[in-house]
Image (cartoon, rainbow, N blue to C red):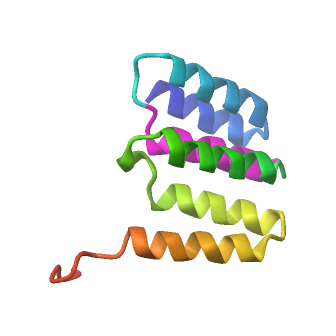
Amino acid sequence: VTFGAAASACGNGHQWQDTIFLLNSARQQPLRVDAVLWSAGVAACERSEAWVRALDLFCLAQRTAEANSVDAGLYASAVSACQTGARWQAALQLLSEARIKFQPAAGVAAK
């Protein structure tokens, strides 16, 4: 929780480099880097218009994170980064991936 809160605070202050530092520090610890921390990193970069770095982080999360750490919020942050960089085709690709990944299993009723 501490890394996530600190990363979010840095991101809100447009200090994306500090957020990346915290993310990398957390990855070197025997802790699980959760979806909140990955999303904070991607969002901090996107808010600072470092959208290429944001998408790099998203790809890193997909390659290295536990399955439940890549959630809909992380996809939303990556889509926002695409918007910032005017990369609409990449945004559509991410939305398509997210729809498939988070589609309810057949036979499961939505509440």
- The spot of residue 55 in percent (x, y) is 70, 52
- The spot of residue 84 in percent (x, y) is 81, 64
Tell me where residue 96 sits by quadrant. bottom right
Front position in the image: 59 or 35: 59
Q: Quadrant of the N terminus?
A: top left
In the image, taking residue 44 as reference, residue 94 lies left or right, namely left
In the image, taking residue 84 as reference, residue 9 lies left or right, namely left
- Confirm whether the magenta stretch covers residue 81: no
In the image, taking residue 71 as reference, residue 26 lies left or right, namely right
Q: Residue furthest front?
A: 63
Give the prevailing secondary structure in the magenta stretch: helix
Front position in the image: 6 or 38: 38
State which region is magenta.
Answer: 33-48
- The spot of residue 3 in percent (x, y) is 52, 27
Q: Residue at x 71, y 44 (%)?
A: 44
Picture layout, residue 86 above or below residue 68: below
Front position in the image: 56 or 10: 56
- The spot of residue 5 in percent (x, y) is 53, 33
Tell me where residue 53 sits by quadrant. top right
